[in-house]
Amino acid sequence: MVDVILGLQWGDEGKGKIVDFFAPHYDVIARFQGGPNAGHTLYVDGKKVVLHQIPSGIFHQNCVNLIANGVVLDPVTLKRECETVASFGIDVKKNLFISEKTNLIIPTHRALDKASELQKGEGKIGSTLKGIGPAYMDKTGRNAIRVGDLLSKNFTTQYIKLRLKHQKLLDNFHFIEDITAWEEEFFEAIDFLKTLNIVNGEYFINNKLNEGKKVLAEGAQGTMLDIDFGTFPYVTSSNTISAGVCTGLGVSPQKINDVIGVTKAYCTRVGSGPFPTELHDSVGDELRKIGNEFGATTGRPRRCGWIDLVALKYTCMLNGVTKVVMTKADVLDTFENLQVCTSYTIEGKTTQEIPYQISKVAIDPTYQTFKGWNCDSTKINSATNLPANMVTYIKFINEFIGAPVKYVSNGPGREQIIVI
């Protein structure tokens, strides 16, 4: 069976650590969507490591790691990551596999991403400028280059054809930046990529399942950034929800078992777009400072706010969440009072539903106040020792969203997870 770990907010929920925590119980860890805009942070031997494309099980020797067809892959980023992982003594050529149907990000995808954002001005989406959107556009436009094409004699011809198509678009944007250095890096990375394990991904993963292997599908970004169900148009370019596992890996729906959703004990968002519970005051600044809320991929300061249970209930519904992991509970240790959003008021009407065009309506969130726990939770290693106010906070969330919080992360370390 396939279990799934994915984000229930706007990404940055701490999924990397959670996948790393669960990885020893699985035989295969597979990334099923997204690109190098993901930043999954792990701590290995006390050192911080940020993975953008390699699945977070790579540091567990018992795990096979698959980059599947739903991902858009930047060979340059992949090469750098492989070098970082190798510095820890991990043989990526042994445990990392890449689906031949995985689409490639080429240098002009990055240029198009940048040119498009520049043209939007104040209406920009907040793209990470990694070329993800343009790469997915070429996928749906049937122009993409895929990993399997690298093994073809026609690869250079395909590349030139796609580059010329992009150049016409860049000319329309009046984009004149020289990307020669990007291309040099790209072709060096392509040579490296061809030395890795390139496989027929859907057969690879289904053969593992037929052998009785346990598979963990690792999502990137978060449900509120889903291309269909997120805060459109301020969304990513792929399906970040559990339904995306089937198309992103090539497995049938009947193979999906547990869906483990990850949420922070509060909310953050990077980039533009609606954020109903965002705090523009000293409390928001304090959350950012204590939680070290800066993007793992971009370094951008994250917008911070209270937990939004309207959105969280919505994302649990969409994903069929069976278990919830609450991360960064320790960030709330020093707050005297905590606010929890339980409904929205839109044009004078109260609702507990996400509106159709959330980016175009004024939302006034309704909060319920809870007492903080005012203690150092980072040393707690048992559910029986959780402070009473934290238990009350978690219990209310359980009942509201209709999915149980089964794990609480109370620090960055691998061992700092409490099983409830």
Image (spheres, rainbow, N blue to C red):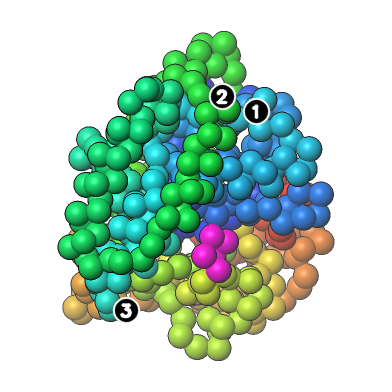
* Left or right position of 382 against 142: right
Q: Nearer the viewer, residue 116 or 6?
A: 116
Estimate the spatial distance between the alpha carbons at disc 2 and disc 3, rounded to whole Å: 51 Å
Residue 26 in sight in this render: no
Residue corresponding to mark 3: 364
Q: Residue furthest top?
A: 211
Q: Where's residue 73, x and y in %?
A: 45, 41
Find the distance from the CA under tag 1 to the CA under tag 2.
7 Å
In this image, 165 relative to 30: left or right? left
Give the residue drawn at x 55%, y 54%: 39
| Marks 2, 3: nearer the viewer | 2
Q: Determine which quarter of the picture holds residue 334.
A: bottom right
**What secondary structure is found at the residue carrying circle 2?**
strand
- Mark found first going from the N terminus, 2 or 3: 2
Q: Nearer the viewer, residue 364 or 398?
A: 364
Q: Mark 2 and mark 3 in contact? Answer it, CB < 8 Å.
A: no
Work out whether 183 lies above or below 90.
Answer: below
Q: Which residue is mark 2?
A: 197
Q: Are marks 1 and 3 in contact (CB under 8 Å)?
A: no
Magenta residues, start to end: 295-299
Dot 1 amino acid type: Lys
Residue 41 magenta-highlighted: no
Taking the image as shown, residue 402 lies to the left or right of residue 176, namely right
Measuring from the top left, give residue 138's x and y in whole percent.
26, 43
* Side of 412 where 267 appears, left or right: left
| Residue reaching furthest to the bottom | 282
Q: Which mark is residue 93?
A: 1
Residue in front for this viewpoint, 380 or 212: 212
Q: Nearer the viewer, mark 1 or mark 3?
A: 1
Looking at numbered disc 3 in the image, what kind of residue is underneath it? Asp
Q: Residues within 10 Å of mark 2 (few under 14, many from 20)?
A: some
Tell which of 354 and 271 is nearer to you: 271
